[in-house]
Image (tube, coloured by chain):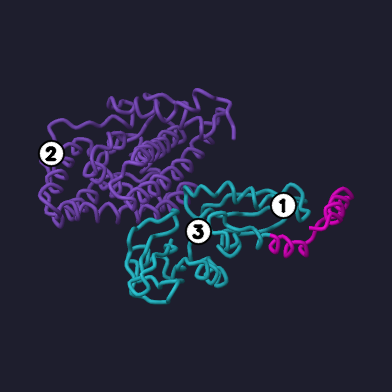
Chain colours: A cyan, B purple
Amino acid sequence: MQPGDLIYRERRAYQGVPLGEDDLPRAWECLTEVMDPEVPVVSVVDLGMIRAVEWEGDRLKVKVSPTYSGCPATEVIERDVQEALEDTGFKNPRIERVLAPAWTTDWITDQGRAALQAYGIAPPPKGQGRDTLHDPGPAECPHCGSTDTVQVSEFGSTACKALYKCRDCLEPFDYFKCL
Amino acid sequence: MTTDQALTEYLLRLADTDMVLAQRFCEWCGNAPALEEEVAMMNVGLDLLGQARNWYEYAAELRNDGHDADFLAFRRNEREYRNLLIAEQPRGDYAVTTAKQFFFDVWHHLVLTRLTESSDERIAGIAAKGLKEATYHRRRSTEWMLRLGQGTEESHRRLTDAVQNLWRFTCELTDTDEIEDQLAEAGIGAGNVGDAWRAEVARVFAEAGLELPEPARHFYMDGKNGKHTEHLGFLLAEMQYLPRAYPDATW
């Protein structure tokens, strides 16, 4: 953030100059640096949690979809989003929590999936949200790439993950469940 | 009763049932038979807590009396709670927890599935989100029913005892009252899921090698109207202690 930006923004707002569409990419850009507190390598944008960024009068409105109903990070993420936008110069942005349509792992970007994998979390298969919800296929070990893996527990260290073990490299790993 | 009044009651039933079950799950923290199971139960409890919050927030808006979701969860007394009686029953041993959860999960999954079609968009949205979670919950408790039912002599016996003990509370899952009927007719509520519930329970029981109990002589079914078994008061006393003792605390 450049300190000048804030002053610049404030002056524009003060003078009643409408903020334009050209500011929205900057909002998106700053949100790519807001990380999920529980998976600190994937941004909220890559997780597909940011559903819309738009102007509501002279105030920015951001629609955020929580991943799980009870995700304890929901409030933290909303606060982080708010702070990131304020630090970039958007005054008093409004965060709206959106439940419908329900967040799905299909919204995680390819970049997000790659980041999960590099972090040691097997990313959820894409485009099979509903099917896999009922019948999880073999998860691919993020360490050695083997698909000879076994589920240790349907639930892992957070609501969004299951616990697996690789039978080839014998390492345990988290699997980001399809939702 | 106006539709809004009925809806508020209905939302509280959904919310309170989720909330009370979540609290029962928390009691397993540090007590579960295996670490993985403890983690799983905390996660299921967390999902239910989140869903409770979503229902409470809607109920608070409808009540429009200046009280928020936290108030509804932490400042209402036993008689004001509208949860299903099965939710408040003590966690017992692992067989009791499993059977309880299974009966609830089958019901929950059916109800949420129907609610995704609700003419009330807010309800449909909350249900669609919760349904994904409930799908995992039901799969997990079904697996445990099979494992305990087909397991050792002891696990089978304990599960049978648990089922016998809990059966008298299941009528609330398969019966509806005027409020539920009214909302079903209005296209808002889930209505009666009794037939589907009995079919699914019978299917899993057959596979687990369990016998369906005879209909209980006395069914307990007034939790929805605030008449509870003696267990709820103790649960609320523990759950509500902190916010009641320090009502202005923030962090």
**Which corner quadrant holds the N terminus of chain B?**
top left
Q: Amino acid at mark 3?
A: Trp
Using the image, name the chain to which the residue with label 1 belongs: A
Check residue B82 for magenta coloring: no
Residue nearest the viewer, comparing B183 with B50: B50
> Can you identify the residue that label 1 sits on?
A56
Amino acid under label 2? Pro
Instruction: Tell me whether the residue at label 2 lies in contact with that at label 1, contact meaning CB atoms closer than 8 angstroms.
Output: no
Q: Secondary structure at mark 2?
A: loop
- Residue occupying the point 32% across, 61% down: A152
Choose mark 3 or mark 1, whichever is in front: 3
On the same chain: label 3 and label 1? yes
Residue at coordinates 37% horizontally, 36% vertically from top-left?
B20
In the rendered image, residue A12 lying in the magenta stretch gets the answer yes
Instruction: Say yes or no: labels 2 and 1 on the same chain.
Output: no
Inter-mark Cα distance, 3 to 1: 23 Å
Chain-order first, disc 3 or disc 1: 1
Location of residue B33 in the rendering, given as x and y in whole percent from the top left corner: 28, 47
Read off the magenta span.
A1-30
Task: Residue type at mark 1: give it.
Answer: Glu
